[in-house]
Amino acid sequence: MKHTNFKKVCVVGLGYIGLPTAAILASRKVKVAGIDINPHTVDTINAGKIHIVEPELDIIVRAVVQEGYLKASMQPEAADAFIIAVPTPSKKDHQPDLSYVRAAAESIAPVLKPGDLVILESTSPVGTTDQMVAWLTIARPDLSFPTSQQENDIPDVNIAYCPERVLPGQVIRELVQNDRIIGGITTRCAQRAQALYRVFVTGKLLTTNARTAEMAKLTENAFRDVNIAFANELSLICDQLSINVWELIKLANHHPRVNILQPGPGVGGHCIAVDPWFIVSRSPEQAKLIRTARQINDHKPEWVINKVNEAIDQCLASGQRAVRQEVVVALLGLAFKPNIDDFRESPAAHIAKKLLATSEARFIVVEPFIDQLPADLAHAHLADLEPALAAADVIAVLVKHDCFKAMVKLLKPPTRLVDAVGILEDAEQLQ
């Protein structure tokens, strides 16, 4: 495979997206400088190890480090292309925090040279790539950068926005196979970025402008958020009307043009729980449905917390326990989705933290994908499923891990169950 135009690539940010991207590029015999501000991350990668959990990634990183194609450091180096994959979190008021993107752009500015390519991969509000051009222009007034108003000019540095769209647990496969959106500030910028991704992507490379690419990434996650919100709102309504929401959705989905998603304890992860707010921040008056969906999904954890507290109160009212301190609550799952160890924006983790901070009950946590509890949950007890169920007066299922589906056979009366994910419905279908 020929890619002589990209002899070296600098990847800024070695997290869940940056490190796999750097490793895949390096596996294609491209020299890659991986940049991160965390010295532990840099040292770990240079030892041929990884600091995140992702299937197959450890094998690739070990190989490319040993072969000399990937080296991590804390300072950007001169390269032919730069990929920025740093966090873009929301502030407390749901406004986007672009400080990491700005810091990354300003860190690479001193080593930029004519002919270079800069790609932003971080999920960002519309207009962020243009803003990055402005930051680079200030930092390097000796270089020319592209603008959408000067389509036919040939700048010193090409710039594009190319969002990731991979699933945790399947990142290595999806980085290669998924279609990618290539959003250039100009058509030439898009073509230059397309050439880089063709080094490792077998899927389609769909070119557009940067603003459309930014909005496309946000739209994908907002679409999913709105559909999840519909299911979560149904669960609230059905609870009030004494209707089994899982049965209801299953029946409704027999309609040939209806496909309702499953409700849960909220929405987590680094994308869906954050990205829709980026749309709202740019168009607050127009994004009414997207805002409402976010509010519904953000509220769902509080509803689950109330259900757990109601179950605790029932234990006391029935005389099963004399005081709240005697009630044993088993919380099943902390991850933001089934069968992974990722807690980012996890509604289950939020529920656990809030309950431990506000309730006087005794808590047992079952999370099979970790060896010890996070520091803010350290005063709970981490246990395996079977002893936790045997000891619990109240069980709250917060994540639909496959291994939890065996719990039906282990339940003992008069245990009270708060099933936030429909685990009983799945378990019954397996019987």
Image: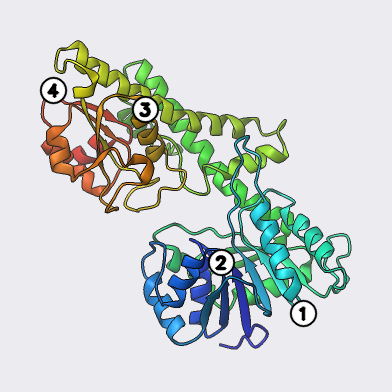
Disc nearest the viewer among 3 and 2: 2
* Residue 209 relative to residue 381: left or right: right
The disc, 2 or 4, on the residue closer to the chain's N-terminal end is 2
Instruction: Give the residue type at disc 1.
Output: Gly
Element marked by disc 4: loop
Residue that appears at 48% across and 81% down: 27
Query: For the residues marked 2 and 4, what is the alpha-carbon distance in whole angstroms?
Result: 52 Å
Is the residue under label 3 in contact with that under label 4 (CB below 8 Å)? no
Picture quarter containing residue 82?
bottom right
Is residue 410 rendered to the left or right of residue 211? left
Judge by depth and name the residue closer to the eye, 372 or 255.
372
Residue occupying image coordinates x 56% and y 87%: 1
* Labels 2 & 4 near each other (Cβ < 8 A): no
Residue at the spot 74% in from the left edge and 77% down from the top edge? 116
Between the C-alphas of marks 1 and 4, the distance is: 70 Å
Q: Distance of mark 1 from mark 3, alpha carbons?
A: 54 Å
Q: How packed is label 4: few (under 14 Cα within 10 Å), some, or many (20 or more)?
A: few
Residue highlighted by disc 3: 304
| Nearest the eye: 247 or 51 | 51
Residue 152 screen position, x and y as percent:
88, 70
Which amino acid type corresponds to the residue marked 3 in the rendered image? Val
Residue count near mark 1 (Cα–Cα under 10 Å), binned few <14, some 14–19, many ≥20: few
Tell me if residue 265 comes above or below residue 117 in the rendering.
above
Would you name the residue on which mark 1 appears?
115
Three-letter amino acid code of the residue under disc 2: Asp
Q: CA distance from mark 4 to mark 3?
A: 20 Å
User: From this viewpoint, is residue 263 visible?
Assistant: no
Q: Amino acid at mark 4?
A: Pro
